[in-house]
Amino acid sequence: MAFYYTEPSRTFSEFLLLPNLTTKDCTPANVTLRTPITKFKKGEEAAISLNIPFSSAVMQSVSDDGMAVALARCGGISFIFGSQTTANQAAMVRKVKGYKAGFVVSRSNLTPDNTLKDVLALKEQTGHSTVAVTDDGTANGRLLGIVTSRDYRMSRDAMDKKVSDFMTPFSKLIYGNSGITLSEANDLIWEHKLNCLPIVDADQNLEYLVFRKDYEAHKEYPYELLDGNKSYLVGAGINTKDYKERVPALVEAGVDVLVIDSSDGYSEWQSETVQYVKANFDVKIGAGNVVDREGFLYLVEAGADFIKVGIGGGSICITREQKGIGRGQASALIEVAAARDEYFEKTGVYVPICSDGGIVHDYHITLALAMGADFVMMGRYFARFDESPTRKLKVGSNFVKEFWGEGSNRARNWQRYDTGGKSGLLFEEGVDSYVPYAGSLRENLDKTIGKIKSTLCNCGAKSIEELQRTARITLVSATSLVEGGAHDVILKESSLSED
Ligand code: RVP
């Protein structure tokens, strides 16, 4: 006879937190959201921690190198999507690792033989007023000069005037040498009243430009997630099919942490993949997704560094409808967190868990953390921002961004859903959709983090670990849910906001 759970499967919206005593020192400024994402022994530090408990989903429509840089800048991590060729995925990882905050690869470049007309056309096209002049017109060619709008007069100069005749030549440029730190570069910028400092190698080849305004922006990111070389941390998704080819390339590109991306991770293929990676590489690897104690323990025994929880709760996911498998995200998380705590008690090894999918409101993130998640993974949340890789469109009178599931025909990520046998995507497990455009990642994250910290203060907790230990959580009845929103009033237009 089949096993029956006596409790129904529950989602985040069915729970609320109760406030605990808020002491005077428990203010948002004193709350830290730093959190471990890889396993560690009692009394030791995790090899990788995030400064905010956010990761972006392993999805084509969410996590490319642009999102990875933007999120790491704010303290979280992206897992670059794996449903692309190994070479392309490795190139994205390499771009993130090669990205130096404040150091930009020049995007506007010409040769000395170009003309003022070319300068103006380039300016129109890129919006940049600083043009690097290199021997071959590339971003890393031999630097021969710089052109800014101070070097020409539109009213006097002929359009066919050669760049070599009006650029500031290299001999008159202040420049930094390869390896200079951002703060040293900034000192030169201030000392010489520059707007832009070129950085060149020993052969005078251009490496980067450092702009005064970028340095200012850089200082505004206090939670940046950096490795020992001051490069951003980045993750990448892998599958259980081509890992022997994919993992070496990702490791070579400098990836910090891998995750096996699968809708159902409780499988021998995942165990084999984890063991292979652990035996052959010095890189952290998470596994999943699971929704119960058995799945958690199985992957931990295989050697996984963190476990991802959730089946069928994703906003674009139709796995539950298509296949009838899954579990309410809250129920799954509560059971896995209990298994994790028990495992820690028994072995002294703490295995972080990630709640993946189904976050709709910001408070769901706080609930997930209170229920034992160490971090969350989100797709829809990040897809709405400028930094996601998809198109922004106008539909009716609203701006939207495209967002599609990995199990949709558009992504065709059959490896994620493979259960052995013939390869290919027989039926869809995800949809192709739009999400309302919401602006910049930074602005939205600041708001969400503000809410989370504020709730932690209500709960008398100054850290995620304290919240997990002391939170009091209650189920809500369907009727009391109504009480939670504005009710029995006539809303004015201005109050009808999205979130
Ligand atoms: P959400 O944040 O609710 O948008 O959920 C994102 C998650 O949904 C992903 O991290 C992944 O686990 C899952 N996903 C991605 N594609 C699909 C699908 O096509 N079914 N599901």
Image: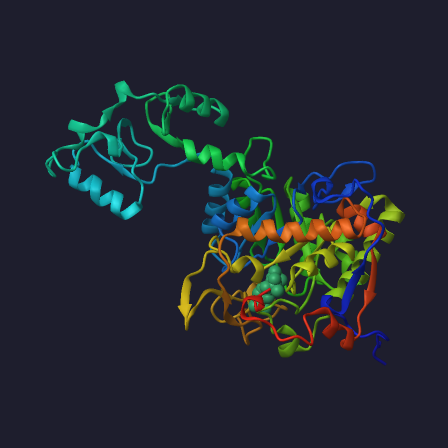
Instruction: Classify the position of the C terminus by image quarter.
Output: bottom right
The residue under the point 21% across, 34% down is 111
Task: Tell me if 78 is positioned left or right of 455 in this view.
Answer: left
Could you tell me residue 451's position as x and y percent? 67, 53
- Residue 101 visible, this angle: no
Q: How many marks?
A: 0
Q: Residue at x 69, y 62 (%)?
A: 265
Residue at x 18%, y 28% (from the top left corner) = 166
Q: Residue at x 86, y 81 (%)?
A: 1
Q: How is the image coloured?
A: rainbow
- Residue 402 x/y as whole percent: 46, 65
Q: Give the quarter of the image for residue 482.
A: bottom right
| Between 378 and 486, the one nearer to me in the picture | 486
Q: Is residue 81 above or below residue 121?
A: below
**Residue 174 located left or right of residue 100:** left
Tell me if I can see residue 254 in this picture: yes
Most extreme residue toward the bottom, as rendered? Answer: 1
Q: Is residue 410 above or below residue 31?
A: below
Q: Position of residue 467 (x, y in %)?
A: 79, 50
The image shows residue 224 at horizontal and vertical percentages of 58, 39
In which of the image's four quarters is ligand 1 placed? bottom right
| Figure check: 421 above or below 355 | below
Q: Quadrant of residue 4?
A: bottom right
